[in-house]
Image (cartoon, grey):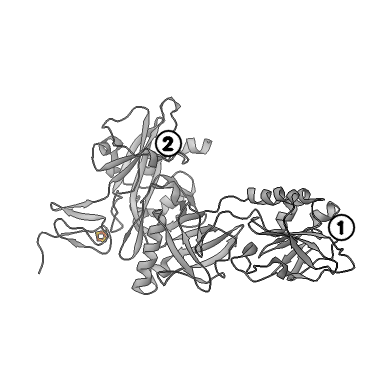
Amino acid sequence: MPDDDAIRCDACPVLCRIKPGRTGACDRYGNHDGQLVRLDPHIVLDRAVSRGESVVPFLEREQEWDGSLVTGRENFVTAIGAGTTYPDYKPAPFIISSEVQGVDMVTVVTEGIFSYCGIKLKIDTDRNLGAETNLVRAQGEAVGHVTTSEYGSQMLSLGGVRHLTGGSRKEGTVTCDTLLNLGNGKAAELTIDEGATVIVQAGKAPIVGGVQEKRMRVGCGAATIGMFAKQWLHKVDEVVVVDDHITGVLSEHQAGKLLGVPETGIKIKGRRSTPGRYFQVAEPGTAWGGTNIQDPLSILKSFNPRKAWPGLRLLMVSTTGEHYAYFELDEAFNPMEKDLPVSLKEPVARIKENCEPALCTVLFMGGAGGSLRAGVTENPVRLTHSVRDALTRVSCGGAPVYVWPGGGITFMVDVTRMPENAFGYVPTPALVAPIEFTLELSDYAALGGYVDHVRSLESMMSDERRRHLSAHGNNPWPLAPAKTRRET
Ligand code: SF4
């Protein structure tokens, strides 16, 4: 039976009918006395500019707006809480004019619904998380895959339209939930097929198999040899830096050769790449240098007795300095473990000192599609060209984005530079992310923008639904004329 008091939300394709006092399926919209309202506050960023007052991170300075259009403070209306345009041909929810350095500017804001989106996750760890292309799961559902490792970090690619829409309903829902949590700065537990379980959170250390990672490697094994060879000279006869990718051997490495380190007769298992650089000394794992070995001697073959000598001093160390062991050869050329000599304590500590804190980095990546671009101009390709020509600045909750070269507007943003809880979702399923386009008013008119819908910044400020936050101190201020941006 139809409920006459219910109203239709048309902010996404779900088209919820919402009864009085209730919310829609995504909890973003509600029926308030017969009015469709966006329930979360609409976020406006403040920047203190008078007297060179420093800008503090917004999370430390959340405040109530005092009602004045402040002197010495600039405001930027973000898309967080602004609402969504659907279907595509309608103008964006807010198109706001402001004057900056004598130039009339326009910011078009909307909460975009992203089906084509995902997260690129950088996890600083040497511990092997799983083989490339293996599936990444959350709550047992496939939500992404392992992609190519980077220097000192392992990379996961999560989300994407195939997991959001191409699998089962549960796969899509769990994928959306995982992206939402990570985008909003929350933790997520991920399990890699035939690999590790890892807890990840933007800006926090990863927890791999229940162990919190502390440091990311200073370099590969061979690079570590090159960096610290001089500091080991005369304190030890041989150094092996154990690494799942490239294990380094001091006496064979070019650094050792140039420093006059004599041959030691050491022999390493694995595949020799170039002098002093060995691949595949063991299987990948979560022990020494990202290998599966607990005993470093397991990667050595017998010493060559014609070159080795009793008493030869051998240091074995991992790429983070987390694992190390010291040996001396006995009369039969067998390595015997001994306490680390005092003279080697500092060189080992130096490796650790050069390892930066291990963190998780969460980059949201999305493609601005029809509703976004058509909400800005009736001729969407002109917006793409305007972004390409650097006339239009794209921001995400006020945070700077990297726009990929090539066609379309495909961008990435570091979620830690955005206000907290900037992301939402709709049950299609898809992510909802804020996006703002800022350009000069004259350029906006030239690209066929909805100039009839432009409203002043002042007219926005009187609405009590807006919440003011201080701008993130490390972000460039998003409201700057293109000419100024090009000059800086
Ligand atoms: S899911 Fe949310 S945005 Fe979509 S129609 Fe329902 S209330 Fe509106």
Marks 1/2: CA distance?
56 Å
Labels 1 and 2: the sequence-earlier one = 2
Residue 262, disc: 1
Q: Amino acid at mark 2?
A: Val
Q: Nearer the viewer, residue 395 or 251?
A: 251
Q: Position of residue 83 (x, y in %)?
A: 28, 51
Q: With respect to residue 64, does 248 lie above or below?
A: below
Q: Position of residue 464 (x, y in %)?
A: 23, 40
Q: Looking at the figure, which quarter contains the N terminus?
A: bottom left
Dot 2, crowdedness within 10 Å: few (<14), some or many (≥20)?
some
Q: Is residue 120 left or right of residue 342?
A: left
Quadrant where ligand 1 appears: bottom left
Q: Position of residue 248 (x, y in %)?
A: 74, 60
Q: Nearer the viewer, residue 103 or 46?
A: 46
Q: Amino acid at mark 1?
A: Pro
For discs 1 and 2, the disc positioned in front in the rendered view: 1
- Label 2, secondary structure: give it: loop
Residue 56, disc: 2
Q: Residue at x 43, y 34 (%)?
A: 55
Q: Is residue 140 left or right of residue 85?
A: right
